[in-house]
Image (tube, rainbow, N blue to C red):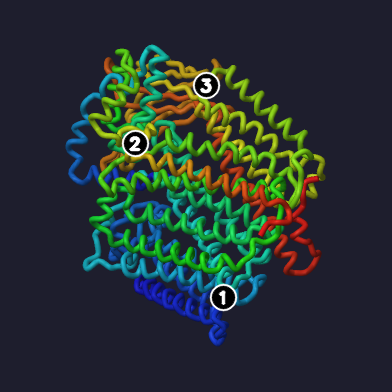
Amino acid sequence: MIAEVGLAALWLAAALSVLQLMSGVFAVRGHDELGALVRPTAIAQGALAAVSFGMLVWLFLITDLSVKLVATNSHSAKPWIFKLAGSWGNHEGSMLLWVTVMALAGGLIALIERRIPEVTMRATLAAQAFVAIGFYAFILFSSNPFERLPMPAVEGQGLNPLLQDIGLAFHPPTLYFGYVGLSVAFSFAVGALLTRQVTPDFARAMRPWILGAWIFLTLGITAGSYWAYYELGWGGWWFWDPVENASLMPWLAATALLHSVSVLAARDALRTWTIMLGVVAFSMSMLGTFLVRSGILTSVHAFAVDPERGTFILFLLAIYIGGALAVFGLRAGSISEGARFSFSSREGALVFNNVMLSAILGIVLLGTLYPLLTEAFDVRVSVGPPYFNPVGAIFTIPMLLVMAVGPLLRWRQDSLARIKLPMVIIAVIMLATLALVVILGAYSLLADLGLAVAVGLAIASVLPLRGRNLLRVPLATWGMVIAHFGIAVALFGMASESAFSEEKLAAVNVGDSTQVGPWTVKLESVTPVAGPNWTAIEGRLQASYDGGEPTEMSPQARNFWAPVQETTESELATRWNGQLYAVVGNEASQGRWQLRLWWKPFVTFIWHGGMLVALGGLLALIGRVKTDLKRRRGEDFVDEESADAEAVA
Amino acid sequence: MIRLLLATLLATLLAAGMAVPALAQYRLPPAPYAYQQLENPAAEAEAQALMETLRCLKCQSQSIADSDAPMAGDMRHQVRTRIAAGEEPEAIRAWLVARYGDYVSYAPTVSETTWPLFAIPFLLILVAGILLWRRIGRKEGDAA
């Protein structure tokens, strides 16, 4: 019965989304008889989608094995938290989560958003419904999560042991929240295009969704990178894998969109550019969903053999992106670009960096899709770090330099001569850092430049606060400062890891020691241990930094038997200035054991930086929402424009 | 990132009948230089730099320098022994490319099949330049 309720709610939600689209379209075309239906329909659609997803979660929690999805992805003996996570840890469930979050977001804007003109609001909700219909159709026709088995299974097939990791369980929903937030921004963009009302109010309505999406994407990428780092056992933290790029591309687009929407909100400039980025950002999240969900990454040919789902998503991708670009092409010409500004101004710097971000996005897109394209013609090429790193750096380094000085410039018009002193200071710091790292013996060009830029940017990012009463600095400005500082911190970690990592592969007798960087690592013992569904070899290590107090470490080499899989459970010893990464491998000759050790100075800065960036986004979001609420209550009126436009004197 | 995808992929590959030969391979001890560095630090650095640009053919998007796959181990052994014997890194790469095709190398080379990878970024620089130049060119007051 639970499954049937879920399925019925899903069909009803799909039907309501059609109604929402129709009434919205009529409203835009001037037949307003149904216009009043748009908001209530969006709210009801959100509620029904939530009921449907709730039913799926319920089925997983009680492990109803008569439902095919539960039987193939769950097990009665799993801890409840993984039963819960199992409901979205598969294709059908994750698509249902996607559309549920989207419907809830639509319901929420229908409920609370009152700033923009009603007709634009209706057009926005119609666009939202248009996107949702495609996903409902996809789920109902090719990925029904509520399908029953003719005979209930005796026991579920369980979940891949690698996936039974709390971080990983919550990784996909984090990214989905990001993707869905961008779909809301896209709907706003389409709504505004249809009614030609691209105004600062529209930008302020759209901004919290972009900020929210951007925070989730930042967290998702940061967590995913750390997971790859500790789980894969070789100390790599970013592989330019298409699945990673699928989350990076929406992030790059969202970053550009976030900055351009701020210009629109504060200065009523960059109207068409903001709309364009809204379309691009959503296209990137659709592309990400397509890459991950269609099976095309396994092999282009495998995709061609079983194309039903992939073709469906590709079809949706073509309709949404093609449709949005068509509307953009038809309408963009009739929307003026807005207020003017000179190149050496805050807007000028933001435009420069928007163009740089778009170029980086173009390169990641090219490098990700090109091998898929050639594979279709039976030519296999590999595009990896040796391509992405230098080619991306051509655009990243100028972008970071402009990012250092941009916040020091005034809006509209300024002169570089006015900020000559801070610019000289930043340049001197960068050159001094560069000289220092070369003296320290790091000769990798990209890593050295990265370290120099990171130190300069870290200093530059706090300069907007100088000479101000810190208690009176708006939250949004704090957000910017912290996010920019976070980028510098992450970059420092990346460059330091690349320049100064030391590796040691050694075969060690029990009782012997080996050296890596400043660490001495002694192999105390090797013991077999067993877990619920694995056996393992566990090495006990005593690691001491620079002859100090030893730290106990116990990495494992695990053998899972269902399914058969070997994994390495690395162990990390974290200090403020880096991590020792230890892995125990197989038995070598003469009773010795393989140890893999890395000393990675400042590697943790990568993820701390990512967290700081997300924190900055969160502060900005809180600041913006608070201002909105004050504005709505009309009490203690704070002019958001002045908060937005405040230049650093 | 969503490495679960490739984990699942690996698991499926194993389950789909490759389990037996793959396991048999695991039982063999790895080649000596798969998990052992060269004595000479300069040679090891050279080998490491080369390994980081060679693709592990059994993995998804990993170089042979960061994979536990037995084949990646064998390739590391090949690279290290050949470097130790004084071979040039590019000669080793050419030897591997001759055996496994261009797919094995991550090193960006301009060829008949890869030129768009380099042409398009140049185009992007050009487009970015034009976009920005138009912004600079249009001084305050004459923007559209």
What is the crowding at mark 3: few (fewer than 14 residues within 10 Å), some, or many (at least 20)? few
Q: Camera-side residue: B110 or A397?
A: B110
- State the mark number for residue A122: 1
- State the mark number for residue A443: 3
* Rendered residue at 72%/47% (across/down): A345
Q: Measuring from the top left, give residue A498's x and y in whole percent.
A: 50, 28
Where disc 1 sits, the SS reads helix
Q: Measuring from the top left, give residue A624's x and y in whole percent.
A: 68, 58
Q: Is residue A529 visible?
A: no
Q: Eyeballing the image, is A73 above or below A470?
A: below
- State the mark number for residue B111: 2
* Rendered residue at 58%/56% (across/down): A212
Where disc 3 sits, the SS reads loop
The amino acid marked with disc number 3 is Tyr
Q: Quadrant of the C terminus of chain A?
A: top right
Q: Sequence-wise, which precedes: disc 3 or disc 1?
A: 1
